[in-house]
Amino acid sequence: MITVTVEERNKIDEIISKNTICYVGMIDKEGYPYVVPMNFGYENDTIYLHSAREGISIESLKLNPNICVTFCNGYELVYQNENVACSYRIKGSSVVCRGKVIFEEDMKEKVKALNIIMKQYSDKHFTYSDPAVSNVLVWKVEIQSVSTKLFGVPHPNSGNYKDNSIS
């Protein structure tokens, strides 16, 4: 099995769009890694997240706004030789994005971000009350770097090799 690096933007966007959850990593106020699963929206190389206004994540990000957002999909068990344990692997794809969190406070921008988040999960049009928008904390993360991999791809010399399509 091999791991294939992906650089084509349309494939990266496709992997992200297939997800319903991302994993957001940061450094907590004691200096330890802290990772939380979150709902998200994605548009124009920007990831949008939302949360309560208080909590461990918020305290941590106020001290250090650098984050890593990871998307992973496809969880098919594949193998090259059914009788060789070392030839088994999970086939899937991942995108790892790095950037800095900016907390959006402008009401119109928050509504725009919430609509982008909801577009990830539904085709419906939503409205938001002013108190609801005021009470939510919207995170905006412009992607500064991205790495993308397809993993569990059969080696080209194996009898199981297929196109490196995204899982």
Image: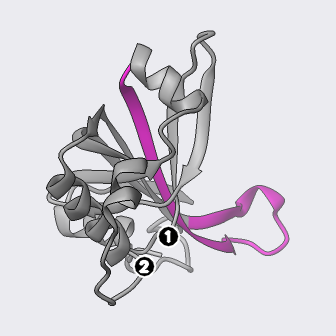
Residue at horizontal 43 percent and vertical 24 percent from the top: 61
Instruction: Specify the quadrant of the image occupied by residue 16.
Output: bottom left
* 135 relative position to 98: left or right: right
From where the camera sits, is residue 23 visible? yes
In the image, 1: left or right of 121? right
Residue receiving disc 2: 121
Give 76 or 12, whichever is nearer the viewer. Answer: 12
Question: Could you tell me residue 88's position as x and y percent?
Answer: 73, 64
Q: Quadrant of residue 90?
A: bottom right
Residue, disc 1: 20
- Asked whether residue 122 is drawn in magenta, I would say no
Task: Count residues near mark 2 (Cα–Cα under 10 Å), then give few for <14, some for 14-19, many for 20+.
Answer: some
Query: Does residue 151 show up?
Result: no
Along the line of sight, the residue nearer the viewer: 34 or 154: 34
| Residue occupying the point 39% across, 52% down | 49
Q: Which residues are magenta?
A: 64-91
Disc 1 crowd, CA 10 A, few/some/many (<14, 14-19, 20+): some
Return the mark for residue 49. Answer: none
Main secondary-structure element of the magenta-colored stretch: strand
Q: Are marks 1 and 2 in contact (CB under 8 Å)?
A: yes
Q: For the residue marked with disc 2, what is the amino acid?
A: Tyr
Q: From the viewer's side, name the closer residue of 138 and 30.
A: 138
Residue 66, image x and y in percent? 36, 25
Q: Amino acid at mark 1?
A: Thr
* Residue under the image location 30 percent in, 77 percent down: 127
Observer-nearest of 127 and 100: 127
SS for dot 2: loop
Query: Which residue reaches farthest bottom?
Result: 124
How far across and how far down the image is residue 10, in percent?
A: 19, 69
Q: Secondary structure at mark 1?
A: loop
